[in-house]
Amino acid sequence: QSAIAIDSLSKTYAGGKLALDQVSFDVPRGQIFGLLGPNGAGKSTLINILAGLVNKTGGSASIWGFDIDAHPRNAKAAIGIVNQEILFDPFFTPSETLEIQAGLYGVPKRDRRTGELLAAMGLADKANAYARTLSGGMKRRLMVAKAMVHAPPVLVLDEPTAGVDIELRQQLWNYVRALNRAGTTVVLTTHYLEEAEELCDRIAIINHGRLIANEPTRDLVGKA
Ligand code: ADP
Ligand code: ADP
């Protein structure tokens, strides 16, 4: 069974813009999967549909076997999403930020692994510092930790390294790889081909809302 199954997914925004045109693909469980495409291709629209932030106009999608229409809460609980914006209160500590998130998701106190999660993201030393004092790279890692608080089987990162320098990018990739090795299926969107090549087992390419490729990375790179 797939981590994510997308079937003939379409989105027309109010105003008439066709952002997704009958896109179909599956994300296999256990992989790092790249959704590649230029700005405006429809990547964020697709992620936002999975996140329940945008309503699709056609087709269907399921996450970890849960249809996003029939079982929206189960589908949502199966993914952690890292958006491009840094979203947390700068006057809470990383530890508090994760506890609040755990509360929002109803994770029982005894099942919370917020300390472990912060350590896994290289934030153990900053667990009790105001989030506003974190470096840019640390803030992004806190966003990843926040997305993983409810232990979803799938982590989705929307342009995780847009505007990030190469050193921080490499660092973030290493953390993402570690989460994947620990069993998390990872989906990331990017417009950097090298990023997708280096990190992903499989790459789907969308352009103008249409799927134009979906192959194991080594096959795609072999053709280029
Ligand atoms: P709402 O969903 O309440 O309409 P939005 O902020 O999504 O509010 O959109 C407001 C208007 O701006 C909409 O008419 C939409 O078509 C347009 N719009 C928003 N984001 C974009 C975008 N990325 N590209 C083009 N138009 C956009
Ligand atoms: P990407 O993430 O690949 O850059 P998006 O999904 O953000 O692409 O955008 C796909 C297309 O849909 C673009 O043409 C964009 O301008 C348009 N779009 C995105 N959001 C809205 C909106 N709220 N209203 C109207 N058009 C939008």
Image (tube, rainbow, N blue to C red):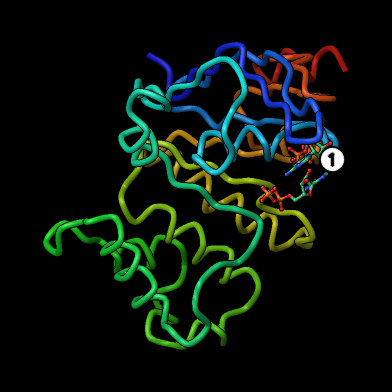
Q: Residue furthest left?
A: 110
* Image quarter of residue 65: top left
- The answer to whether the residue bearing label 1 lies less than 8 angstroms from the nearest atom of ligand 2 is yes
Q: Amino acid at mark 1?
A: Asn
| Residue 57 x %, y % | 62, 23
Which residue occupies 55% across, 32% down? 32
- Seen in the picture, residue 9 relative to 131 is either above or below; the reply is above
169 or 142, nearer to the observer: 142
| Residue 128 x %, y % | 38, 85
Asked if residue 197 can be seen in this view, the reply is no
Asked if residue 46 can be seen in this view, the reply is yes
Which residue occupies 37% across, 25% down? 64
Quadrant in the picture for the C terminus: top right
| Residue 25 x %, y % | 59, 15
Quadrant in the picture for the N terminus: top left
Residue with the mark numbered 1 = 39
* Image quarter of residue 199: top right
- Residue 45 placement, left or right of 155: right
Q: Residue furthest right?
A: 224
| Residue 86 x %, y % | 60, 66
- Residue 169 placement, left or right of 2: right
Which residue occupies 15% across, 58% down? 108
